[in-house]
Image (spheres, rainbow, N blue to C red):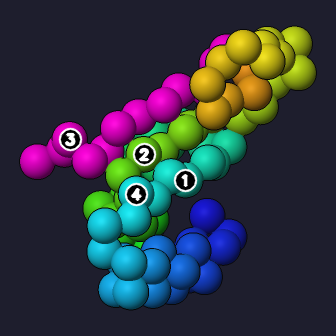
Amino acid sequence: MENAFLTLLVIRHVKEHLPNTKIYLWTGYTYETLIHHPPHPRVEDILDLIDVLIDGPYIEALRDITLEMRGSSNQRIIDLSKKL
């Protein structure tokens, strides 16, 4: 969440200039942490603008190179473009 301001600026710029571009965001936080502990205004805006969130920390003991877009099996791919 330390770089939420710059992340939001980049996402807004991409959406403004390339509105059909899908935006994927990787984070070491879980989705639940991002929305509940406590909600951060910029993080809420980021989640509203991105299409896919890959959440959770990379855990070496759970490393799996066969996973799509993830490094460890605890990480999830969350399609936020389907939210209301």
Of the numbered discs 1 and 2, the one sitting upstream in the chain is 1
- Horizontal and vertical percent position of residue 68: 61, 25
Q: Kindly identify the amino acid type of the residue bearing the numbered disc 4.
A: Lys
- Left or right, 69 with reference to 35: right
Inter-mark Cα distance, 1 to 4: 10 Å
The outermost residue toward the left is 84
- The residue positioned 26% from the left and 48% from the top of the image is 81
Q: SS at mark 4?
A: loop
Q: Is residue 27 above or below residue 74?
A: below
**Distance from the alpha carbon under mark 2 to that under mark 3:** 9 Å
Q: Tags 2 and 4 in contact by the CB under 8 Å rule?
A: yes
Q: Earlier in the sequence, mark 2 or mark 4?
A: 4
Could you tell me which residue is drawn at 66 percent across and 73 percent down? 3
Separation of marks 3 and 4 at Cα, in angstroms = 13 Å
Residue hosting label 2: 52
Q: Position of residue 17 (x, y in %)?
A: 38, 86
Amino acid type at image mark 2: Val
For marks 1 and 3, the one nearer the N-term is 1
Point out the tag, 3 or 4, that comes first from the N-terminus: 4
In the picture of the structure, the residue carrying the numbered disc 3 is: 82
**Residue range of the region highlighted in magenta in the rendering:** 73-84
Under mark 1, the amino acid is Leu
Q: Quadrant of residue 2?
A: bottom right
**Coordinates of residue 13 in the picture (x, y in percent):** 45, 86
Numbered mark located on residue 25 in the image: 1
Q: Which residue is mark 4?
A: 22
Tell me if 38 is positioned left or right of 54 in this view.
Answer: left
Q: Residue 5: which numbered mark, if any?
A: none
